[in-house]
Amino acid sequence: MIKVTIYNEGEHEKTSEAVRSVYPDGIHNCLKAALESDDVVITTVTLDTIEELTEEALAATDVLIWWGHMAHNKVPDEIAKRVQTAVLEGMGVIFLHSGHHSKPFKLLMGTSCNLTWREDGDQELVWVCNPAHPIAQGIDRFIKLDHEETYGEPFGIPEPDELVFIGNFEGGEVFRAGCCYRREYGKVFYFQPGHETFPTYKNPDVIKVIKNAIYWAAPIYRKKLDCPHVKKPLEA
Ligand code: ZN
């Protein structure tokens, strides 16, 4: 059984009729309904309940999914740091779409994570560039999204350990849309599709990618970070 926690800040849904019409129960509940299965159990957290992301809750989470956009700054620094530490200690994490500017993603990357963006509802083709990767299984050559926010290079991230998808937009932009990282014991996946006014998280292929990423990111080893001092080389 894989324990997943979905954090969606849940602010757009409060103020935008356009977003509510696409995600009436919030992005988190849409994802939960699509991703939950016999071997994946999901709990959800929003900005209003973010204090629930305690050290204990993160220790009991195999994979954290993070969607945020307009309220990145309202995430307490200590919670962002707590997420970073949990990943270093083995928890998996999946950052979606505008999560590229979230505090925990920037802590884990150590770079600006800036990108070029445009909101014209372009069509996007999310191309599989590594068909042998576990996260790409079940996806044909590309995922076609009729409308998505355009994200373009340069994307201010460290060189990904593995690049799984490249997005190509109607206007010509390209973007590293699916990036894998290992950070100490934990795995990180960034996946670009998912603007709040488009029904991206109702696309079965997008859901398949996120589901694959849950299995990929689930920890195989977890340990509190330490830096042991031993007096002899072979001392236990
Ligand atoms: Zn967006």
Image (spheres, rainbow, N blue to C red):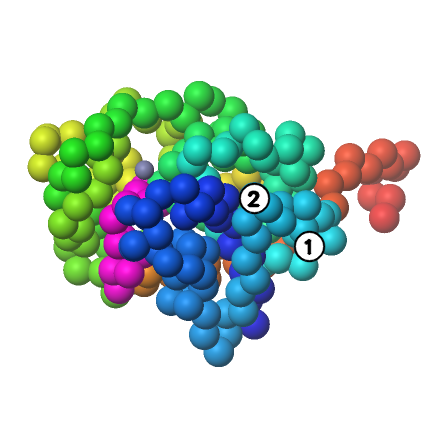
234 or 200, which is in the foreground? 200
- The residue lying furthest to the bottom in this view is 38
Determine whether the residue tagged by mark 2 lies in a helix, strand or loop: helix
Query: Is 56 on the left or on the right of 153, as rendered?
Result: right
Amino acid, disc 2: Leu
Please tell me which residue is depicted at 44% across the width and 21% down the height of the picture: 112
Q: Residue 161, percent across and down?
A: 40, 38
88 or 9, which is in the foreground? 9
Please tell me which residue is depicted at 59% across the width and 35% down the height of the picture: 75
CA–CA distance in space, label 1 to label 2? 15 Å
Q: Residue 147, percent across and down?
A: 17, 46
194 falls in the magenta region: yes
Q: Residue 220, percent across and down?
A: 58, 58
Q: Residue 181, percent across and down?
A: 45, 40
**Which mark is drawn over residue 47?**
2
Q: Is residue 166 above or below residue 90?
A: above
Query: Is 40 on the left or on the right of 24, as rendered?
Result: right
Name the residue beneath numbered marker 1.
Answer: 57
88 or 152, which is in the foreground? 152
Determine whether the residue tagged by mark 1 lies in a helix, strand or loop: helix
Q: Is residue 166 visible?
A: yes
Q: Earlier in the sequence, mark 1 or mark 2?
A: 2
Q: Within 10 angstroms of label 2, few (less than 14), some, or many (20 or more) residues?
A: some
Q: Is residue 216 above or below residue 97?
A: below
The span shown in magenta is: 190-205
222 falls in the magenta region: no
The image quadrant of residue 227 is: top right
Amino acid, disc 1: Ala
Q: Nearer the viewer, mark 1 or mark 2?
A: 2
Query: Is 10 on the left or on the right of 87, as rendered?
Result: left
Ligand 1, image quadrant it occupies: top left
